[in-house]
Amino acid sequence: MTMIFGVPMAVFMGQLTLGLVNGAFYALLSLGLAVIFGLLKIVNFAHGAQYMLGAFAALLGFRYLGINYWLALILVPLVIGGLGMLLERFLLRRIAHLDHLYGLLLTFGLALIFEGTLVNLFGVSGARYATPEILQGGLNLGFMFLPTYRAWVLVAALAMCLFTWFMIERTRLGAYLRAGTENSQLMQAFGVNVPLLITLTYGFGVGLAAFAGVLAAPLYPVSPTMGSSLLIVVFAVVVIGGMGSILGAILTGLGMGIIEGLTKVYYPEAANTVIFLVMILVLMLRPAGLFGKEA
Amino acid sequence: MMNSTINSAPATAPTANHSAREMIRVKDLHAFYGESHILHGVSFDVKQGELVTLLGRNGAGRSTTLKAMMNMVGRRTGSIVISGQQTLSMKPHHIPRLGIGYCPEERGIFASLDVHENLLLPPTVSSGGMSLDDIYTMFPNLFERRRSQGTRLSGGEQQMLAMARILRTGARILLLDEITEGLAPVIVQKLGEVLVQLKARGMTIVLVEQNFRFAAPLADRHFVMDHGQIVEEITASELPARREHLNTMLGV
């Protein structure tokens, strides 16, 4: 059997794939966090809960309304993103003139409310969401066995990341977003409806989290706490990548997933801490993050 | 319309167009940043096609007057009528749509956008703006550097860009804050030529200026500010006789 640094090829590739899939979730979630932070200057502590709501909406939509996976992949981000817009419009906007720490506290409180409510209704054990039939099974690549659903997650997450990159870097609305991130007051003076831009941006970031949640539903147990543990890692990823660039957030997410996966192969004890070690290292050497701009 | 008598005479000679349509009338304007009271009853007016300056020392309230007109300061009282519309209770993003272009003192070029994107950024506020071709003809440097990051340009080029991007929007009223600050004489001269061309196109311009020698030959009227008030109005024809007096007041 082919060995890579003393590890069977199949094990190595398997962990690499797992790492890449985790990395795809890190990328999707850190992208949304970075976009929201850029314009609103708020660290969205509800991001994990919104990812969880995405998974739950897919689960409940299937159970009670018969909405299938593919429809959920489109509808759920729109619905949860719309919910995000309402939160921005009626809660976050009211405290926008205060210190941004209040926004952090408010979103943290919202996350607790979402999680608490669902724990009360469904308990913490989590439910299974069936993998759509066409994505069940796996592909034998010769050197490894690749579960089809994981391959699909990777493709879908990367496509969504690229779509986001295109929207922000190559469209007029994206130029508004980038410029508003730098100087929103001047954008108002040009006649841009910045409050509306803020609402749409928050909704988009939340929609990305919900999209990730739907992708995750067949992969992990759907439980009210599935977002909070993930969010801590995603914050570390954002710190490592820095706030400056969209592509940076995507690459850092994938990179950290791979590093985590490979650590599981070679030194499993450190797998849960390696991202935080990288974060400490980056903070020491490049405080603005790998792709961030020095303030 | 508040003032329906529109003067058909060409607005070439300074001060000859006193009965022209009023574009801006600011009356008893007070402005506050938090607790500090910055403007103390500013009143002035600008007619269509006129170029007026706001002169004064640093901290006299000139930039704040422009910002207050754009609803960019904290609280305001008084009256600001632009193109016949009271703007005091208008949302900030609705004010530019009256046909106003604002060029901030710090120029406000966006680092995350290239020159071309910076130029295309401000939404059109009315029809009849300059075309991209016209703009690149007026500012050939910008065309050569259109793919550069906005903030990689020299100070002079950034100022050209900050001017150019509001000309594309169709704005007919320009509020320009310290556009010559810190620029080389040759650039300042070029900006002077641009202002003459814009005036010939019938633009109404309010110029906040430190460089009085730059502003003097361009302007129809000068408003001198001190301690958040307009303390004096000097027309272009009165200027030669009052130059000494003005120099003392501005401390130059």
Image (cartoon, coloured by chain):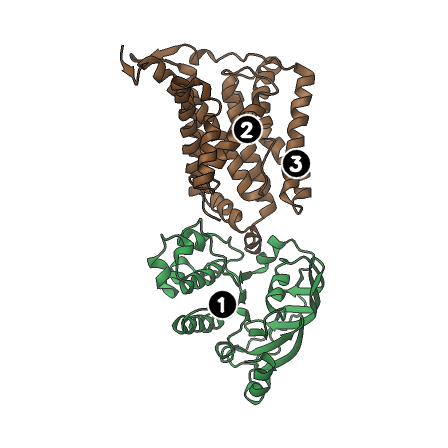
Chain colours: A brown, B green
Up the image or down, B65 lies above or below A286; here it is below
Out of B62 and A43, give the one closest to the viewer. Answer: A43
Question: Residue B15: x, y in percent?
Answer: 57, 81
Residue B161 visible, this orientation: yes
State how far apart marks 3 and 2 are (Cα): 16 Å
State the mark number for residue A105: 3
State how far apart marks 1 and 3 are (Cα): 42 Å
Q: Earlier in the sequence, mark 3 or mark 2?
A: 3
Locate residue B220: give its quadrant: bottom right
Answer few, some or many: residues within 10 Å of disc 2's Cα (few below 14, many 20 plus, some between 14 and 19): few
State the mark number for residue A232: 2
Out of B194 and B75, give the one closest to the viewer. Answer: B75
Question: Residue B98: x, y in percent?
Answer: 59, 59
Up the image or down, A85 lies above or below A175; here it is above
> Are dots 3 and 2 on a single chain?
yes
Determine which residue is flagged by label 1: B179
Give the position of the C terminus of chain B as an image quadrant: bottom right
